[in-house]
Image: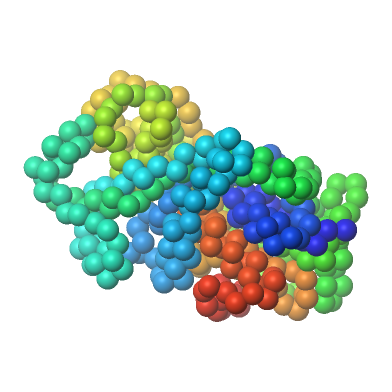
Amino acid sequence: MFDFIIIGGGIIGLLTAKELQQAGASVAVVEKNSLGQQATWAAGGILSPMRPWHYCDAVNAISSISQSVYQQLSNTLFTETGIDPQWVLSGMLVLNGDDMSPAIDWCEQHNDSHEILSTEQLAIQFAHLRTIGEPTLLRPQVATIQPHKLLAALTHYLTNKGVTFFDVEASHLLNTATAVSAVQLDNNTVKAGQYIICAGAWSSQLMPDGIEQPKISPVKGQMICFPPTDIPNLCMIMEGNRYIIPRQDGRIVVGSTRENTGFDASTTQAAFDELRDFAQQLYPALEGIEPDAHWAGLRPSSPDSIPYICRVSPFKNLSLNAGHYRNGIVTAPASAQLMVDILLDRPPQLDTTAYQLIR
């Protein structure tokens, strides 16, 4: 019997496991697919909400804490495992003119490092871009991380620390009126003192009947990637809901769509063409180069993008850490810390009210 069972092996579940393991608990993670193969695998790895001026304080607060610890987290995992999660301080250019005024206001109000580049400065500093005919916002302190590398490092780290992994689907919870007694797997059950649902878009399917249900639904996002280039002085680009992320190996990731297709995570030619054209219009050097990867993931959408990080009443041993929508990577460390603060009755760093199941 374990102290804690976490259902869901994405970035939220894995970092929750890390926090609990560091506190001395015995932990098991149940994941029906390969670890992190859903929303985390599909993510871009931008370590900031794309447009924080469009998010509420509850989202930005948990994002800010996570941003402050990610470099150290990356360094620790690299030291412990030899796998580099590739934390890179690449900065972000905001190109949407309609967003400029609220973006600048938000940066000033929150002391977020920023600079307004004139069209002349932009042409000199980022000569690889098409001609931009308006001033542009540069946020130089926005970093990125490589989700695939982060997952590999975390998995290796947790395995070395004794966390148990069950590579099988959790079909449902066994429970009484006030407590969960076990997780039903394919052919057996597994038990713990406490149970935490971290199953992203699938979290609602695991909740017991007859109680308040989290409002989490899947939203598909498609992405593409170009083969390695030698374009110099790259930084992240954000224009509306789309973005471009340079990787250390020269590859260029482009995302993403927002599609309400239920649990259909298939890719489409229309999305491929749209994202390719977007990138090639911004980067003339990409014209004639075809992307060599195309994938999709299902983000766990929640009201106002505020995740649920809470105990689940009336059960004395069931909790929920899910619903992070497009901000799963950037909010994961602080989400895990808050969840474990609640579970271990430690003073939380944040007010927990906004993240409750009933709001």
Is residue 14 rendered to the left or right of residue 295?
A: right
Depicted 172 relative to depicted 86: above or below: below
Q: Which residue is located at x 34 percent, y 43 percent?
A: 90
Q: Which residue is located at x 21 percent, y 58 percent?
A: 100
Depicted 68 relative to depicted 281: above or below: below
Depicted 190 relative to depicted 86: above or below: below
Q: At which x and y percent is residue 322?
A: 60, 61
Q: Is residue 70 visible?
A: yes
Q: In this rendered view, identify the residue nearer to me: 274 or 51.
A: 51
Is residue 318 rendered to the left or right of residue 65?
A: right
Q: Which residue is located at x 30 percent, y 40 percent?
A: 235
Assign the C terminus to one quadrant of the image: bottom right
Q: In this rendered view, identify the residue nearer to me: 75 or 295.
A: 75
Q: At which x and y percent is residue 19?
A: 65, 59
Farthest residue, direction front: 79
Q: In this rendered view, identify the residue nearer to me: 113 or 166.
A: 113
Depicted 356 relative to depicted 62: above or below: below
Q: Which residue is located at x 22 percent, y 62 percent?
A: 104
Q: Is residue 264 visible?
A: no
Q: In this rendered view, identify the residue nearer to me: 264 or 124.
A: 124
Q: At which x and y percent is residue 226?
A: 40, 28
Q: At which x and y percent is residue 224?
A: 44, 34
Is residue 143 rendered to the left or right of residue 342?
A: left
Q: What scheme was used to colour the molecule? A: rainbow
